[in-house]
Image (cartoon, helix red, strand yellow):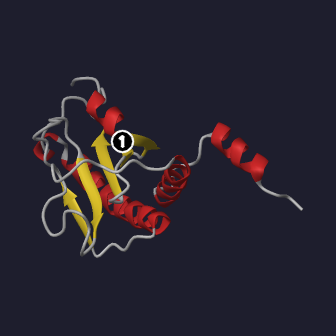
Amino acid sequence: MAEFVLDPAFTATAAALGDLPLCHARLQLDARYPWVVLIPRVGGMRELEDLSSADRARLIEETVLAGAAVRAVAGVLGLAVDKLNVGALGNVTPQLHVHVLGRRAGDPAWPGPVWGHSPGEVYEDEVLGLAVTAARAALAIPLPLGLLRNWLAVIPWS
């Protein structure tokens, strides 16, 4: 079996959240949509059928967790989630991955697909930090020690 290597397209378009038992999780860098991408850390995967049945079951469970992360990010952004969209497209990036994104009536692409609709909106640094933290908490991925130290340093301990 091939070694897992993350396609560079993911690092260019999404912030790392961390690793779940099967998938590497990333936050898509478009502040208009709360959006998590799951990439199974199994080399050579292009289709769902390429995964073992146990890994497919694990992917479903991690997709449900990603839905909770999407809702947590939506809370940070002050957005509603009317519908969770889940898709494994792979037309542009063939490495197997699953998009989990929160849609709402009136979002920029509603009711059509978000892919190719319009240029993304960049996260403000502070909001991105809050969104990543909220997503990691929902996914039960601990904060890196360095980030935790930085945040503890600014808390007014009185």
Residue 41 in sight in this render: no
Between 52 and 26, the one lying in front of the other is 26
- SS at badge 1: strand
Residue 14 in sight in this render: yes
Image-based side of 129 in relation to 82, left or right: right
Q: As shown in the figure, which amino acid type bears the numbered disc 1?
A: Ala
- Residue 128 at what x, y percent from top left? 49, 50
Q: Residue at x 30, y 36 (%)?
A: 10
Q: Quadrant of residue 91?
A: top left
In the rendered image of this protein, does residue 83 appear above or below residue 120?
A: below
Between 59 and 117, the one lying in front of the other is 117
Q: Which residue in the structure is indicated by mark 1?
A: 14
- Residue 19 at what x, y percent from top left? 43, 42
Quadrant that contains the N terminus: top left
Total labels drawn: 1
Q: Residue at x 13, y 42 (%)?
A: 90
